[in-house]
Image: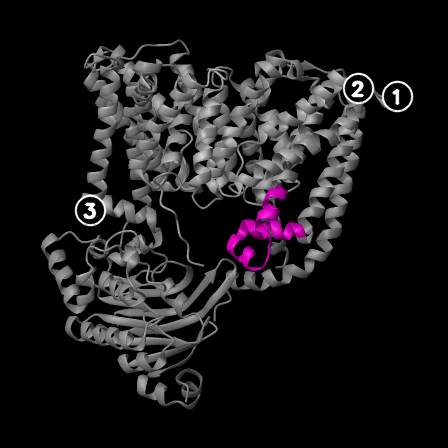
């Protein structure tokens, strides 16, 4: 019998499992380190960079929403720009028409989007794969049209959109508005990411993933697929909606054409690059969505789109399973080497 | 030896399924691979067809085919009737047979062979324009064998041909296999859970257990063995 | 009633475009099991190539044939170079590849030929067809060519060995390999054919919507909608779906005046989704029954 490397690797596959317990501790350390770094950045960075990083976090949260639906539950959505837009407009309308303080608009946006997502999820139960994609695509196309709709202009501000005042730091803290928004967004991000991580690890999370991996078996096991799928739609919309609300506050402006189908495409691209089914991957996704188009533009204004496309292809070729998958592969290879 | 296999390992992802399997097969001979579920019998056939990652030596008529693409292995004259039959469900019976001859160019020969398959399997002729998905299990199995014959193979790999079939149908099928082997000189490697039938058709048998060959001998010897009889023959 | 009939006919005329696009979409879908989101851009790029040849004083038919042939080669090349390396990756990764292809072609066309609107000639002329003002000779020609292509494809797939091999490779790649079919090349061939059909579609559509890099966006969306509506498993259904979408779009624009022109696309899509609620696999699509 040959002692091939594959055979040894098969034995290692079993050996790696007990190491996972230690990995949990190491993970906690990584997260703590990241949070500390994130906390320190605005104190040393220029205002514009702080602003950009706040936007990165907003996109990361939006993409986390999409990830919950598409990555963990296998329901394909091209319509998340609509939920983002609903969240943004909820905030904008509450703040500019009724003077609601900005932090209360977040749960409001979340609730509205959860309801819309849940309601959309109900008929979506009948549609699979590409047919669902088309339905969500219809939603994405409809949203800017609805926002520009004449009779609703009193609320939505029509084509020109709405402007929001920038919130001031509370309690007279010695930081400026941009830094305050950064910390506020960071706090919301941490809470919601933790929530998502817990959801995924829970029984509900396992049910949701079971539905993605093998819907027939899941149903045979007694999982109420219909309920879980619509709930996931709702929660996913909630996450992206809260991101939209934050986005509106950060940018201080909402207009119908910002929430077009192109935004949905950006989210999807980000999701794939970050890693489907990976929660930390969403941060990489946010970074990608914000910075790469700018990088492409700076390389060549005339061919910005082509450069962007080439970058996408390079990333996909090198990391077909996204960044998170790639890192996992590298870590696995490294730990296998260590066992020699 | 037409087919020679040495030190064959096979892998599903990181999991190893075969450990140093070795055997051989002469022109026109029939041999069988026995074993319980999960022993690795199907994996052996899939490794021979290049459908699963493997390592080791596989020689067919002197040609080293380990690591070759499935399409190229098939074109050497190895027809594989897979587990689950692999029928093209949405096309007709006749189109399935035409697909079996896809790597050949001689139109007259193909037409003649289709008629010969219908001679072996009259029930297929009755249903020649029917969609293959509407056939019964037994008929689909016959179609799968017929399709394999269209290749004019020198070696046929059969994966559990009796699976899910009524005893009468199975008997009929094995009789046809015997005829094909005798008249056309097609060598066969049959994976079977139904050991009685397999030992009847084959001259030589191998027994697999968790990816390793644990017994190797002529059919009558294997069939008489106490442990084999208890485990696989039921008495 | 007369208005309804007129609008239906007008819808059929515009629907010819969508039917043509839907056909190309379904062709690729059957070959590779995904929707090609860059189909429209490929068609647009092919049309630009034809236009360029015409600018270089080539006769229309030379430019037409050259564009179709080059598109076929391009389609095969794209499959071999771009999509084959990632065919084992998760489905959404190929989606990103499609988006990348879209970006590259759109941006490239804009760079090479700029964004000013250009006219593209039609071999059918633009007179009223048989005296009907609702449908021009070009539109009639477009419908004719679409139906003709559909007929040729039917003959190819049902009547030739290669067509049978392609169907087998798409339906059951593993079994196809077991009969010696080179599945990889069948997929590449499918791409080439879809690219060629797309080129024809682009060259038929350009005289109507005028040639510029963004000309295919709306058309592609409607083409998709038509393909999905008709059922992705059926080329005939896709063509029918394309015509239906044209009719729905026209009727929505005419008879729902309150929403008017801006919401035309939205209304059309909503109607299509409504149909999908009733027939989740499309009107002519085959319900896929999976044995548990």
Instruction: Tell me, for residue C161, which label it has, or none.
Output: 3
Q: Nearer the viewer, mark 2 or mark 3?
A: 2
- Judged left or right of residue A69, residue A127 is left
Magenta-drawn stretch contains A213: yes
Identify the magenta region.
Answer: A204-232
The numbered mark at residue A174 is 1
Q: Secondary structure at mark 2?
A: loop
On the image, which quarter does residue B169 sit in? bottom left
User: In this rendering, which labeled residue sits more in front, label 3 or label 1?
Assistant: 3
Chain at tag 1: A
Asked if residue B208 is positioned above or below residue A36 in the image, the reply reads below
Q: Nearer the viewer, residue C128 or B178?
A: C128
Task: Tell me the quadrant of the picture where the C terminus of chain A can be found.
Answer: bottom right
The residue at which mark 2 appears reads as: A167
Between the residue at mark 2 and the residue at mark 3, the CA separation in whole angstroms equals 70 Å
Residue A83, quarter of picture: top right
Q: Is residue C236 magenta?
A: no
Who's the residue at 40% across and 31% down the image? C224
Image coordinates for residue C67, horizontal then vertical, percent:
26, 23
Q: Is residue A241 left or right of residue A272?
A: right
């Amino acid at each position: 019998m040959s002692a091939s490397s594959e055979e040894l690797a098969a034995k290692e596959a079993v050996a790696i499992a007990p190491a996972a317990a230690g990995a949990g501790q190491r993970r906690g350390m990584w997260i703590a380190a990241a949070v500390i770094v994130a906390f320190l950045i605005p104190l040393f960075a220029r205002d514009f960079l702080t602003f950009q990083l706040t936007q990165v976090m907003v996109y990361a949260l939006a993409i986390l929403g999409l990830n919950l639906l598409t990555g963990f539950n296998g329901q394909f959505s091209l319509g998340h720009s609509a939920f983002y837009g609903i969240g943004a407009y909820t905030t904008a309308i509450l703040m500019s028409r009724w003077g609601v303080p900005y932090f209360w608009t977040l749960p409001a946006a979340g609730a509205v989007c959860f309801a819309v997502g849940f309601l959309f999820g109900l008929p979506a139960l009948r549609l699979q794969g590409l047919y669902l994609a088309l339905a969500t695509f219809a939603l994405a196309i409809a949203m800017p049209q609805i926002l520009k709709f004449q009779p609703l202009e009193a609320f939505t501000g029509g084509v020109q959109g709405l402007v929001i005042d920038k919130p001031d730091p509370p309690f007279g803290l010695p930081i400026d508005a941009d830094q305050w928004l950064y910390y506020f967004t960071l706090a919301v991000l941490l809470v919601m990411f933790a929530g998502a991580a817990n959801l995924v690890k829970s029984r509900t999370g396992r049910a949701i993933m079971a539905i993605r991996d093998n819907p027939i078996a899941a149903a045979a096991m007694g999982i109420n697929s219909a309920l879980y799928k619509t709930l996931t739609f709702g929660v996913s919309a909630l996450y992206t909606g809260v991101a939209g609300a934050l986005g509106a506050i950060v940018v201080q402006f909402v207009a119908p054409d910002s929430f077009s189908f192109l935004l949905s495409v950006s989210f999807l691209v980000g999701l794939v690059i970050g890693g489907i089914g990976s929660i930390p991957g969403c941060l990489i996704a946010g970074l990608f969505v914000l910075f790469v188009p700018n990088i492409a533009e700076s390389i060549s204004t005339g061919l910005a789109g082509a450069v962007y496309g080439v970058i996408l292809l390079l990333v996909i070729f090198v990391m077909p399973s996204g960044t998170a998958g790639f890192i996992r592969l590298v870590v696995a290879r490294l730990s296998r080497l260590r066992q020699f | 030896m037409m087919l020679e296999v040495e030190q064959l390992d096979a892998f599903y992802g990181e999991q190893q399924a075969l450990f140093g399997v070795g055997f051989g097969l002469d022109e026109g001979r029939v041999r069988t691979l026995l074993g319980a579920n999960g022993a690795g019998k199907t994996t052996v056939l899939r490794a021979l067809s290049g459908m699963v990652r493997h390592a080791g030596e596989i020689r067919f008529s002197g040609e080293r085919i380990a690591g070759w693409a499935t399409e190229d292995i098939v074109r050497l004259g190895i027809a594989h009737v897979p587990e689950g039959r692999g029928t093209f469900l949405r096309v007709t019976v006749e189109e399935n047979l035409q697909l079996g001859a896809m790597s050949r160019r001689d139109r007259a020969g193909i037409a003649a062979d289709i008629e010969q398959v219908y001679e072996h399997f009259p029930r297929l002729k009755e249903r020649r324009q029917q969609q293959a998905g509407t056939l019964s299990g037994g008929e689909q199995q016959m179609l799968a064998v017929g399709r394999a014959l269209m290749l004019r193979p020198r070696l046929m790999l059969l994966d559990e041909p009796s699976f899910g079939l009524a005893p009468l149908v199975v008997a009929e099928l094995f009789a046809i296999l015997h005829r094909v082997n005798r008249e056309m000189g097609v060598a066969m490697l049959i994976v079977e859970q139904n050991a009685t039938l397999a030992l009847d058709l084959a001259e030589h048998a191998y027994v697999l257990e968790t990816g390793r060959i644990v017994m190797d001998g002529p059919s009558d010897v294997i069939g008489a063995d106490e442990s084999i009889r208890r485990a696989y023959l039921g008495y | 009633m007369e208005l309804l009939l007129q609008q239906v006919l007008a819808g059929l005329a515009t629907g010819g475009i969508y039917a043509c696009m839907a056909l190309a979409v379904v062709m690729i879908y059957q070959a590779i099991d995904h929707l090609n989101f860059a189909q429209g851009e490929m068609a647009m790029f092919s049309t630009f190539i034809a236009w360029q040849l015409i600018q270089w004083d080539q006769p229309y038919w030379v430019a037409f044939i050259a564009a179709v042939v080059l598109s076929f080669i391009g389609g095969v090349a794209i499959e071999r170079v771009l999509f084959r390396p990632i065919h084992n990756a998760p489905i959404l990764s190929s989606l990103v590849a499609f988006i990348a292809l879209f970006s590259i072609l759109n941006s490239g066309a804009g760079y090479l030929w700029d964004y000013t609107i250009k006219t593209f000639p039609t071999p059918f002329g633009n007179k009223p067809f048989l005296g009907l003002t609702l449908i021009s000779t070009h539109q009639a020609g477009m419908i004719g060519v679409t139906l003709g292509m559909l007929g040729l494809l039917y003959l190819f797939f049902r009547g030739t060995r290669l067509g049978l091999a392609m169907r087998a490779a798409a339906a059951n790649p593993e079994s196809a390999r077991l009969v010696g079919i080179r599945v990889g090349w069948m997929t590449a061939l499918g791409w080439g054919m879809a690219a060629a059909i797309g080129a024809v579609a682009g060259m038929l559509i350009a005289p109507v919507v005028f040639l510029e890099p963004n000309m295919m966006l709306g058309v592609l969306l409607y083409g998709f909608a038509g393909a999905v509506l008709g059922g992705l498993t059926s080329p005939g259904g896709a063509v029918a779906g394309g015509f239906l979408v044209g009719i729905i779009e026209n009727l929505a624009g005419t008879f729902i005046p309150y929403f008017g022109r801006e919401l035309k696309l939205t209304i059309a899509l909503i109607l299509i989704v409504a149909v999908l609620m009733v027939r989740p696999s499309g009107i002519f699509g085959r319900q896929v029954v999976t044995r548990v």
